[in-house]
Image (cartoon, grey):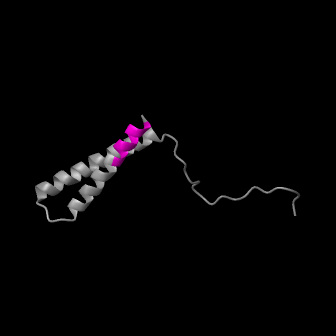
Amino acid sequence: MLDQNLARIRAHRNNIHRYRSLLKTTLSDLERRFIERRLSEETSALAVSTSSTFPIALTVPPGPVTPARTGAAL
């Protein structure tokens, strides 16, 4: 199951890369809108796949971390 999820994630990443490179080319307005929509859909699908495959997210604390003081007061 993990292999299938990783393959899906890889496919979404490859599609996102392909769509971003296509946006750097000369396109008609219709083509550009279509690719931008597909890019948005792939980005959303990647987020869903990633969050379901790796449900635990490590986050950085919002502010500076102050170490706890140990021992006697100075």
Please state the horizontal and vertical placement of residue 25, each as a whole percent of the image. 18, 65
Residue at 69% x, 59% y: name it: 66
- Prevailing secondary structure class for the magenta stretch in the rendered image: helix
In the shown orientation, is residue 5 left or right of residue 23? Answer: right
Residue at 43% x, 42% y: name it: 51
What's the magenta region? 2-10
In the shown orientation, is residue 66 left or right of residue 73? Answer: left
Please state the horizontal and vertical placement of residue 47, each as a whole percent of the image. 38, 45
Number of numbered discs visible in the structure rendering: 0
In the shown orientation, is residue 47 left or right of residue 61? Answer: left
Report the residue that reaches farthest toward the front: 3
Q: Looking at the rendering, in which quadrant would you find the N terminus? A: top left
Residue at 63% x, 60% y: name it: 64
Residue 69 belongs to magenta span: no
In the shown orientation, is residue 27 left or right of residue 61? Answer: left
Residue 8 belongs to magenta span: yes
Considering only vertical position in the picture, is 26 above or below 4? Answer: below
Q: Looking at the rendering, in which quadrant would you find the C terminus? A: bottom right
Please state the horizontal and vertical placement of residue 39, each as a whole percent of the image. 26, 51
Considering only vertical position in the picture, is 50 above or below 30? Answer: above
Report the residue that reaches farthest toward the top: 1
Considering only vertical position in the picture, is 66 above or below 51? Answer: below
Please state the horizontal and vertical placement of residue 3, each as a whole percent of the image. 41, 39
Residue at 29% x, 47% y: name it: 42
* Location of residue 69 (image quadrant): bottom right
* Location of residue 7 (image quadrant): top left
